[in-house]
Image (cartoon, grey):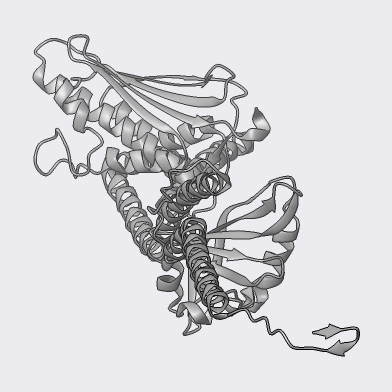
Amino acid sequence: LRYWEMPIGSIYIGLSLDSLNQDRKEMFSIMLFWTFFCIGLGSILAFLFSRRLTQPILALEEVTRRIARGDLNTYVDLSRKDEIQSLALSFNTMTEKLKTTTVSKNYMNDIIQNMNDSLIVLNQKYEIQTVNLATIRLLGYPLEKLINQPIQKIIPENMVNFLIHDLNNMINGKSIFPKESIYLNEAGKKIPVLFSAAAMRDTSENQRTGYLLLALNITEKKETEAALKSAYMKLKNTQSQLIQSGKLASIGELAAGVAHELNQPLMVVRTTAQYFKLAHEKNKFNPDDLLEFSDTLEKNTRRMMNIINHLRTFSRQSSRDFISVNLNQVVEDAFLLISEQLRLRTINVNKNLMKNLPQVLGDPNQLEQVILNLLANSRDAILEKVNNSSKNFSGKIDISTQATGEASEYVSIFVIDNGIGMDESELEKIFDPFYTTKEVGKGTGLGLSISYGIIKDHNGKIEVISDVEKKETIFRISLPVLRSDL
């Protein structure tokens, strides 16, 4: 302290900081508590918020993994109304569509893999992209040796260019219709197949994306065809032998009639020769008679030559080459061999042959054999009726030719007799081999069977109608007219 600027004393004033320090410590503790409390509370809230936010995302992720593993029955189940829920619904819709698509894909794949036919998918470079199990079984290749391989691997080299040409020319949705082709298996063996193909297109851009090749193994079919062809050739040879045997049998049956047919002109020749000899011995030879007798000799010798030549031609093995045939001439040739037999048995014959009859395509020799068989059957039916009849009975055979059909597209031969006739049971078996109504030793039962086969080979038909009460039997042969005569 000072008084008039002179120090007179000192005053000391002091304040204790203990309470202040205590308050400061308490304040620091409170602030530290609330700081850690807020941090903890914020962490808890942040954890809860992040868990609520990430849990559905993790659920979506887990569902995605399960779907990726092929479990398409998994769906996202969320009960909330926000963007995550919308995403979950979209995800479930996508899964349902994917399931439908996958089921359809698996269904189609099952169909393709279980097909019996070979199916091959090519890309635009003609490389194999997909094959089914039938293809693997057919070719013997493992799957990995076929995928991405060129089509030349399974198609013979000489056929590849034709196949590629056909594939390139498929336009406007057209396909290669089934046709026979060849596949090569792993061992290089040729496998016959029935082949077809179609182009695959991208419908959105209308561009060709590849090709579908479908093939059916026809190895068994080919082997069966070869066996059938061999059997058919054997059958044809057997039929030819039967036809030839039938001819020889017919010649045997006709021998007596032919001999009598030859005997008539021979008697004329002999009588003429005796006349010349007697006239010479008596010096009564008249030169004016020479021309007349020469004409008679020439006429009768020509008749004998015709009979002998025709008999030789008829007995000859038939060729399988068909020619243009006039059925009227065939009928006349048949009567050349059998007419004498019919005359000797007092069977009247009426011929009504159409003039300008259209030609048919066939073997005249075989067709003559058919007519001879029918005439011989008519003869035997009439003789059987004669033997069983106590009345005076006159046998008759009518034979005629005419153009038939709506447009005269057939030529028909009718052979009608008034013999004993046939009942229904006989008509059903009349064309069966070895079936005969004659007594044992009087028929082989092959005549009509051979005739049926011959007419079938000529694309014709043979029919029979018989009425036991009217005692009438009608055979009808119909053959197609040669096209040039239509």
Q: Is residue 123 left or right of residue 340?
A: right
Q: Is residue 104 above or below residue 327?
A: below
Coordinates of residue 191 in the picture (x, y in percent)? 48, 72
Residue in view at x 59 percent, y 37 percent: 295
Task: Give how far across and how far down residue 131 sits, in percent.
Answer: 50, 67
Q: Nearer the viewer, residue 301 or 279?
A: 301
Q: The N terminus lies in which quarter of the figure? A: bottom right
Location of residue 127 (image quadrant): bottom right
Reply above or below: 43 against 203. below
Residue at (27% x, 48% y) in the render: 249
Is residue 223 depicted above or below 358 in this figure? below
Q: Is residue 21 left or right of residue 268?
A: right
Residue 358, given in percent of the width and then of the height, sits at 60, 28
Q: Residue at x 46, y 46 (%)?
A: 96
| Relative to 166, 333 lies left or right | left
Does 416 sit left or right of 316 as displayed? left
Residue 233 location, quadrant:
bottom left
Relative vertical location of residue 199 with respect to residue 435 in this rendering, above or below: below
Q: Is residue 131 visible?
A: yes
The foreground one among 303 and 243 is 243
